[in-house]
Amino acid sequence: MTTNRLLRTLALGVLTLALAQCGGGSSTPASPSPTPSPSPSPSPSPSPAPGGSSLSISPQTVQGQSQPQATVTLASPAPDGGALVTLVSDNPTVAKVPATVTVAARSRSVTFVLDTATVETSTTVRVTAIYAGASMTATLTVMPPQVVASFNVRSQSRGSGVCVVEQDAADFDCFLDGSSSTGFVVAWVWTYRMGTTTLGHTSQVANSHPQISTKCAFLNTATGGDGPNGDRYLNMTVTLQVQDRSGNTSAPMQHDVKVYPNGNCGFSY
């Protein structure tokens, strides 16, 4: 082997050895390291409700046209500039609230007035106060006007406070007139008593006649009296109670009425 060939062979071996030590002789490419996926950013949490805040209404039951008071109380004093509270009524035609109220700076509460309307039946309204993302609720019940009985009795022939017996006591000529009663009245409940006997009826209209189902027997136990002009009559007591559509019933109202037999049912006068 010539000297030049020997030198080339030695040089090639040294180069091969160097490449093997450096990894340069590998024909398989190294796999790249995987790129880590970015972690998703957490969604922002809603503001926590200010625990201890409240809404109250007093009184909680009122008649229509009343103005109950409501109070918003915060869990902590309002910041500088005050705390703006939004108000909502779920039935503003029955109970109306201001759109907003402000709790003064460094104060914890504010009071406002609700306006209520007249209703025919008992109605419950939910009022909501919203502050710092939190809701506070309270309920108010609005009642119809109180029913109050009022009436008069009028004979067609003898005037006020009198009834005249018609033939065989089939009817009295008088009207029981309850139209002066107040409230949303849907029923007039009448009772009438003579002596130990009581009759009655219920009407859906304000004016009606006494209904004498027992005819002359209704007069049998009646007590009598004498008028200042010498006329004689029987005593009858008439009572009225009225009801509204919610079932509320008035206190009874009572009148004493003079009943003239008019020669019927065996009476001589």
Image (cartoon, rainbow, N blue to C red):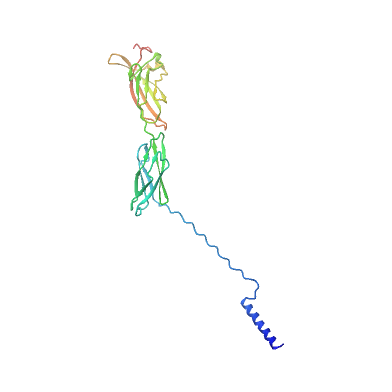
In front of the other: 116 or 63: 116
Q: Position of residue 5 (x, y in %)?
A: 70, 86
In the rendered view, tell whether residue 133 sits above or below residue 224.
Answer: below
- Say which quadrant the N terminus sits in: bottom right
Q: Residue at x 63, y 78 (%)?
A: 19
> Which residue sits furthest top?
268
Q: Residue furthest right?
A: 1
Q: Residue at x 69, y 87 (%)?
A: 4
Q: Quadrant of residue 242?
A: top left
Residue at the front extreme of this rendering = 4
Say which of 5 and 144 sits in front: 5
* Picture coordinates of residue 46, whole percent (x, y): 45, 54
Q: Which quadrant would the C terminus be assigned to in this image?
A: top left
In which quarter of the view is residue 127 placed?
A: top left
Give the left or right position of residue 23, taking residue 72 as reference: right
* Residue 38 image point, x, y percent: 53, 62
Q: Is residue 6 above or below residue 257?
A: below
Q: Residue drawn at (35%, 44%), measured in percent from left and top?
A: 112
Point out residue 244 in the picture as x, y percentages from the top left corner. Answer: 40, 31
Nearer the observer, 138 or 231: 138
Extreme bottom residue here?
3
Q: In the rendered picture of this protein, how many numbered marks are placed on residues? A: 0
